[in-house]
Image (spheres, helix red, strand yellow):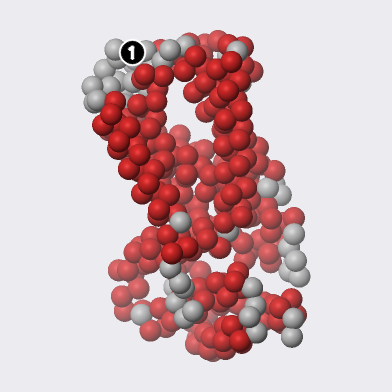
């Protein structure tokens, strides 16, 4: 049997098991249906391995079987270890299964950033295509050398107030980038490109103006968490858009329901990264008295840790493989 026909015949009960497992456990209304669904998924997994179906399908069935096993046999400790499973298994594997969307989101974000950064460095007028004169002067004032706290307005509040502001700002960007994926992916594409252009314009302009000595030590500390979080939020939005554009054998609503579960895993992880980025930005990045080599060193360590984490699933084999 060809894989397409195999998926068509079994998609309904895979979706039903996804519904039972939504939220990391068994829905009470559907709890009685989980054991037979779990046994059938295990049989489908064995058959798919025997027939050498695609790695993407095997990953999906492996994940369903693993989650079903924990839901049935590990209920007593489910809540205690749910957060650990999310960090170690669910989030990294969701990134791996959707790596093409992650790469697409990274390109939509980083290429405009690089192009606009070069343009803003080459010509002073480039930044004014995105920001008005008042905003540009505000950016310059925030990174003026000699300030006790860089990266914030002079009348800004203390570190805890700025921590709250950064959470609000970061999570707002992530939510818009993710949720507008419902517009057939066009909203996520727009916000990825726009945020890339905006960050590139600010960086290029401040570098040309001579504020690189304060700007780069400030952003390097939280950039790994923040930029990665934005890209992953965009990838989650593209997941929703792809389900609507190409639903396959399912209805658009059915495809969206399947995609939404995994997109939620990605965006939850991205949100956690952005909250951590806000903490670093508020309590570490803004302290201009710290030596630049120390800032760059810590920023480099964070980049290595973040990239190692989001690619960790490539170095592991899923349960049952």
Residue 211: x and y in percent read 41, 15
Q: Is residue 90 above or below residue 160?
A: below
- The N terminus appears in which quarter of the rendering? bottom right
Q: Which residue occupies 52% across, 76% down?
A: 62
Residue 9: x and y in percent read 72, 82
**As rendered, which of 82 and 90 lies closer to the eye?**
90
Task: State the residue position of label 1.
Answer: 145
Q: Is residue 128 above or below residue 246?
A: above
Q: How many marks?
A: 1
Q: Which residue occupies 57% across, 37% down?
A: 110
Q: Which residue occupies 36% across, 79% down?
A: 75
Q: Is residue 289 above or below residue 65?
A: above
Residue 164 visible to an observer of this rendering: no
Badge 1, how many Cα within 10 Å: few under 14, some, many 20+?
some
Q: Is residue 230 left or right of residue 82?
A: right
Q: Which residue occupies 61% across, 86% down?
A: 50
Residue 283: x and y in percent read 27, 33
Quadrant for residue 212, please give it: top left
Residue 249 visible to an observer of this rendering: yes
Residue 249: x and y in percent read 76, 70
The local secondary structure at tag 1 comes to loop
Quadrant for residue 146, please give it: top left
């Amino acid at each position: 049997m060809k894989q397409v026909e195999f998926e068509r015949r079994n998609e309904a009960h895979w979706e039903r098991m996804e519904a039972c497992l939504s939220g990391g456990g068994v829905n009470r209304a559907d709890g009685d249906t989980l054991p037979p669904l779990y046994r059938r998924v295990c049989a489908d997994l064995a058959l798919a391995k025997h027939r050498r179906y695609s790695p993407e399908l095997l990953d999906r069935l492996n994940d369903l079987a693993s989650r079903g096993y924990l839901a049935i046999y590990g209920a007593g400790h489910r809540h205690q270890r749910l957060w650990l499973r999310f960090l170690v298994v669910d989030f990294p594997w969701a990134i791996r299964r959707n790596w093409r969307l992650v790469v697409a989101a990274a390109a939509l974000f980083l290429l405009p950033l690089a192009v606009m950064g070069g343009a803003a460095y080459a010509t002073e007028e480039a930044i004014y295509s995105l920001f008005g004169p008042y905003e540009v002067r505000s950016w310059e004032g925030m990174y003026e050398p000699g300030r006790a706290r860089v990266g914030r307005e002079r009348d800004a509040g203390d570190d805890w107030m700025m921590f709250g502001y950064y959470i609000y700002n970061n999570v707002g960007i992530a939510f818009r980038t993710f949720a507008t994926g419902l517009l057939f992916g066009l909203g996520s594409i727009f916000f990825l490109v726009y945020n890339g252009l905006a960050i590139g314009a600010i960086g290029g302009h401040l570098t040309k103006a001579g504020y690189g000595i304060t700007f780069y030590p400030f952003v390097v500390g939280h950039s790994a968490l923040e930029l990665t979080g934005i890209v992953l939020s965009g990838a989650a939005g593209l997941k929703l858009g792809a389900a609507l554009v190409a639903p396959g054998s399912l209805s658009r609503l059915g495809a969206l329901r399947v995609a939404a579960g995994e997109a939620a895993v990605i965006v939850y992880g991205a949100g956690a990264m952005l909250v951590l980025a806000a903490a670093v930005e508020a309590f570490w990045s803004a302290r201009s008295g710290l030596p630049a080599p120390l800032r760059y060193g810590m920023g480099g360590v964070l980049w290595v840790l973040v990239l190692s984490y989001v690619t960790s699933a490539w170095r592991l084999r899923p349960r049952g493989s």
